[in-house]
Structure formats: C-alpha cells, structure tokens
Image: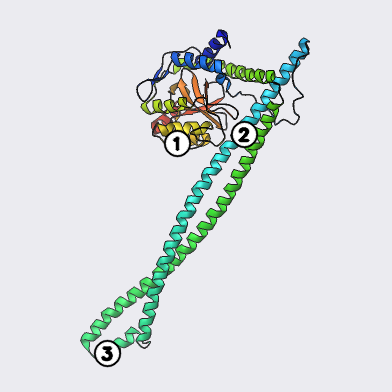
Amino acid sequence: MGSQGARQGVRYVRGESREQGVTGEAGGPVVTGRRLAVCTAVVLCVTGLLGATASTAYADDPKDPPAGSGRASGAPEDAEAGARHLDDVRKKIDALYRKAEQATDAYNAAKEQVERQQKEIVKLARTIDRTQHDLAALKRQAGALASAQYRGGGLPAEAKLLLNADPEAFLDNATLARKGQLAAKRVITQLGRLQGDLQDYSHAATDRWERLEANRKKKESARKDIEKKIDAAKELESRLAAKEKARLQKLEDEAAFREQQKWLDSGVLDEISNKASAAGRKAISYATAQLGKDYVWGAVGPNTFDCSGLTLRSWQHAGRTIPRTSQEQWRQLPHVAVRDMRPGDLIIYFSDASHVGMYLGDGAIVHAPRPGRQVTITGAGSMPILGVVRPDGDRHDADHVRDK
C-alpha cells in the first residue's frame, strides 16, 4: 500500500487528532496523540493489520455457497454484479463471526458458572464431612449417657435422689443430676440440629450438581455453536480466489472506515480531552504489547486472546480484577459518558454487549476483532457503541452518567 493508503490509515484511526499523551510504566510514551495515530496507522496499513475490523452489516446464515464468486468478465455490469456479490459474502461472513462472538460470550459465562459451582460443591462436601464428624461425636456422647444409665440399674436420677438417706450425698447427686439432664438435653438438641443441617447441605449439593450439569450442557452447546459459525465463515472465505480475498479485506476496511468517519463527523472528539490514569497507562501498555497476536475464542492469553480476554488481562496487569466477559464488564463496571471517556476505558459494542475494545485516545481502540484476525488498533467508532465503562472508576462515575 503506497503513501496514499498510509495517509488514509492515519485519518481512519485518528480523524482530526489532538495531542493527548499517555505514558508507559517506565515513563516512556505508549500513546501520544498524533504520534500514536501516525506511527501505528502507517505500520498497520503496510502490514495489513489495520484491516482487522468488524463491520456493522448483518445477514442470516448463508444457505447457498458463493458460486466462484464475483469474477468480472470484462463487461461493466458483470464487474458491478461481482462487486455486489462479494459485498454480500462479506456481510454473511461478518454476520457469522458476530454470531460466533455472541456464542463465545455465552460460552465464557457458562464456563464461569461451571467453575464457580464446582468450587461451591467442594466447599459443601467439606462442610458435610465436618458435620458428619460432629454428628458421630454427639452420637458417641449420647451412647455414653445411655450406658451410664444402664450401669445405674436403669433407675432415673430422680428416683435415686429420693432413695438417698445422706443429705450431703443427696445434694451432690442433685447437682450432678441437673448437670446430666442439661448435658443430655444439649446433646439431643445438637443431634437434631446437625441432622437437619446435614439434610440441608445434601439438598444444596444435589441442587449444585444439577445446575453444574445444566451449565456444562450450555457450555458444550455454545462451543458447538461457535465452531459451527466459524467453520461456516471459513468455508465461505475458502471458496474465494486470492484476489477476491484481498478485495474482501478491503471491503471490511472500507465499511469500518465509513462508520468511523460518521463517528468523527459527529464532533465527538471535540468533547474528549481526558488523560489516562496511572492504572489506565499500565493497561494500555499491556494491551498494545499484544498487537499481532491471534484472536482465539475463549482465550485469555498470553499468546492468544478473545476480545474480553484481552481487556481482562490488560487490567489485571494494571492491578485491577474485572469480569471475564464483555457483557459482565458492561453490567458490573462503572459507566461513563462517551464524552467523558479517557484512555484505558473500555468501549462496549453492539446492543448485546458482545464486543469490547480499549480506548487509546485520538479516536482509536486496541481490540481482538474476531477469528482469523489479530489484536490490532482501529477506529473507536467503527462499530456501534453501546457505552463506556471504567475499570478503575467508582460509583461516582456511574452516578455522573445517570445525572447527565
């Protein structure tokens, strides 16, 4: 790609850029406004990484494979028909990968639930074991009380007191009898409580197992759904000739560029001038160090990532633990208005919160786009924005958004 393509790439990432500095852990620059936009966009345009973007078109799963698709026979109408056909293929591929991403989020959520329920079952099993030991000890105490009564000839303590002629012995026996009665009552009460607890724990464990199996089935179903969608998308791409694949990549870039340009034309960058926090700089440093690594669904690094896996690890590097999936990140983290976002914040995309990227400043994000692509930098407005969350924010941030 020549200098014209490089200039287009710079415009694509930053729009009308302003100086907006972000420094790394050691004080060196990680994201520095126009410098980030120019350097990364030129490099990414040359290497082809900037093309790893998601478009906004939707389509149903393809029923019919492309018929060798879109080779122009020389006539203008044939070329136009071929272009339309290739764009249809692009939309179908994009829709398949979008659906795979939605299923990935369902897979990750089910996986988290399985892991949590496994821990709960282990904890319950240990509680049941301790309760059984306590129950056995109480039964031994109850047995000892019964043996003592048997050795006393089976007479109740009260009868022995009445038959005792020695006043002092009578009082001693009365005290002992009272203590014995209290001890026996306590043992019986504890026995009943522990038996009830043990029954409750057993029911809870059964319930956890049932939920565990249900979530395992959800997880497996989501995994199969993901593989089905990815395989279908790869099948579509595999039927294209090399030139058509290159053209397909270009169509993806153009679609993303159009959306980014609309976002920039809205003047949104005129209101965004915040600096990254110290933790945000660390998260950005980690995320940008992963550029070029492959997207793999369900992956959380260090060699491959899905979209939320990248943001998870980046903020872990910054010392913050955030939810695993983009949907939970949207649900649990403090929200901020788009005009108030700063580098390091997470932009959540699509109405179902199925994609996430990290804002770098100057209208750019770093993200893991989809299967078959790599971690890359692209325009923050190249996909439909649902909202922005701040991993190192607080409740004030969320209240601030509601007030606006």
Mark before the other along the chain sequence, 2 or 3: 2
Amino acid at circle 3: Asn
Secondary element type, mark 2: helix
Amino acid at circle 1: Ile
Q: CA distance from mark 3 to mark 1?
A: 74 Å
150 is higher (above) or lower (below) than 269: below
* Residue at the (77%, 12%) spot, across then down: 77
Q: Give the position of the C terminus as an image quadrant.
A: top left
79 is higher (above) or lower (below) than 106: above
* Residue at the (72%, 26%) spot, across then down: 239
Tell me residue 240's x, y (percent): 71, 23
Tell me residue 14's x, y (percent): 49, 15
Residue at the disc numbered 3: 164
Identify the mark at residue 322; answer none if there is no mark.
1
Q: CA distance from mark 2 to mark 1?
A: 23 Å
Tell me residue 110's x, y (percent): 55, 43
Residue at the disc numbered 2: 100
Residue 58 in view, yes or no:
no
Tell me residue 86's x, y (percent): 70, 20
Residue 219 in view, yes or no:
yes
* Residue at the (63%, 37%) spot, across then down: 226
Q: Nearer the viewer, residue 255 or 196?
A: 255
The quadrant holding residue 281 is top left
Q: Nearer the viewer, residue 46 or 112?
A: 46
Secondary element type, mark 1: loop
Of circles 3 and 1, the one toward us is 1
Secondary element type, mark 3: loop
* Residue at the (44%, 14%) spot, across then down: 35
